[in-house]
Amino acid sequence: MKAHLTRRYRFSASHRLHSTEMSADENRVTYGKCNNPHGHGHNYALEVTVSGQVDQSTGMVCNLVDLDGFVEREVLSRYHLENLNTLQEFAQQVPTTENLSVEIFEILQRGFYQAHLERVRLEETMMNSFEYAGTAEPKH
């Protein structure tokens, strides 16, 4: 029997939406108040959905302790209370929540093997959330 498991995590981070490829005016028009030179912060809610066969002996898709530990070590400790603009993965791309979702998915896909990673969903505000389910080909 295949089942899906979704775990929810929280972290806080700041960013400034600004592209070096655009003029100051273009950045203001494109990103509005999110282009504030001092940045702004969000309390993100991250959902990680994995799937797999339910283990007959444990009754679980994967060990929650292992999933939680991996997400804490590889994702939350990396992004919590950080200015995303200062991180290497955003040196060449704007740290939008769309791009952050892709980065988190790729971290999980590269390192968590106990279950199949289906998707990540990242809630930025009550009004905005973003999902990423990867490409057809895994990046192992």
Image: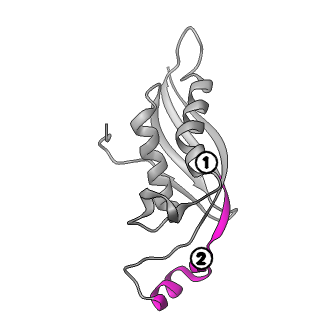
Q: Foreground residue, 21 or 128?
A: 21
* Residue beneath the point at 62% across and 25% down: 65
- The answer to whether the residues at label 2 and label 1 have Cβ atoms under 8 Å apart is no
Q: Secondary structure at mark 1?
A: strand
Q: How is the image coloured?
A: one colour
Is residue 138 placed above or below 3 in the rendered structure? Answer: below
What percent of the width, then of the height, locates residue 2? Answer: 49, 24
Q: Is residue 11 magenta?
A: no
Numbered disc in front, either 2 or 1? 2
Q: Foreground residue, 57 or 86?
A: 86
For label 2, the residue is: 34
What percent of the width, then of the height, locates residue 4? Answer: 54, 32
What percent of the width, then of the height, locates residue 127? Answer: 66, 65
**Earlier residue among tags 2 and 1:** 2
**The residue under label 2 is which amino acid type?**
Cys
Is residue 103 placed above or below 72 in the rendered structure? Answer: below
Rounded to the nearest whole Å, what is the CA distance between mark 2 and mark 1? 20 Å
Is residue 92 left or right of 97 when viewed as pictured?
Answer: left
* Residue beneath the point at 58% across and 51% down: 79
Q: Foreground residue, 119 or 73?
A: 73
Total numbered badges shown on the rendered structure: 2
Q: Which residues are magenta?
A: 24-44
* Residue occupying the far top of the picture: 57
Q: Is residue 30 magenta?
A: yes
**The residue under label 1 is which amino acid type?**
Leu
For label 1, the residue is: 46
